Image (tube, grey):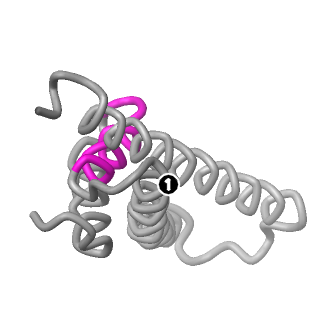
Amino acid sequence: MAEQDTLLNAVIGAVATAILSGFPFAPVFGGALAGYLEGGDRDDGLRVGAISGAIGLVFTLVVFAFVGLVFLGFLLGGMPMHLGAVGVVFLVGAAVFAAVYVVGLSALGGWLGNYVKYDTDLGN
């Protein structure tokens, strides 16, 4: 992988996050992979980790929405129209939490991946 190919490294990190999504803190590992591949300085690792998390978040939310709507459709015979304000607030809150969790941990992982590459014996 070429250093400083931010989009490619971010996509690789997002794919790693998706593959490892069954494990806790999977975004850290995906972001670390992206940050390690990106090279540069700590800011570059942080940036590519955050981009990786955003890409992974978009895929996660699309899959979550699709699966959720399919299950609701099968279980309830159609999309319920009586979710109300509490349901909407819950869904928005869950989406915000997911965004902070995935993008934040991926950015942290990107920083750590850059650190491992340049400041430890593992990166040499």
Q: Judge whether 82 appears above or below 20 on screen.
A: below
Tell whether 79 sits left or right of 120: right
Main structural element of the magenta stretch: helix, strand or loop? helix
Quarter of the figure with residue 38: bottom left
Name the residue at 13% across, 67% down: 2
Q: Which of 86 and 74 is in front in this view?
A: 86
- Residue 116 occupies which quadrant of the picture? top left
Task: Provide the residue designation for mark 1.
Answer: 43
Up-down relation of residue 46 to residue 5 (above or below)? above
Residue 110 in the figure: left or right of residue 65: left
The part of the chain drawn in magenta is: 23-36
Q: Where is residue 119 in the image (x, y as percent from the top left)?
A: 30, 29
Give the SS element for disc 1.
helix
Q: Looking at this rendering, what residue extends furthest in the right direction? A: 85
Residue drawn at the location 50% of the way across and 69% of the way down: 65
Place of residue 104 in the rendered image (x, y in percent of width and height, measured from the top left): 57, 47
Q: Which residue is drawn at 15% across and 26% down?
A: 122
Q: How crowded is mark 1: few (under 14 residues within 10 Å), some or many (20 or more)?
A: some
Q: Is residue 8 above or below residue 52?
A: below
Taking the spot 9% from the left edge, 63% from the top edge, the residue there is 1
- Amino acid type shown at disc 1: Asp
Q: In which quarter of the image is residue 76?
A: bottom right
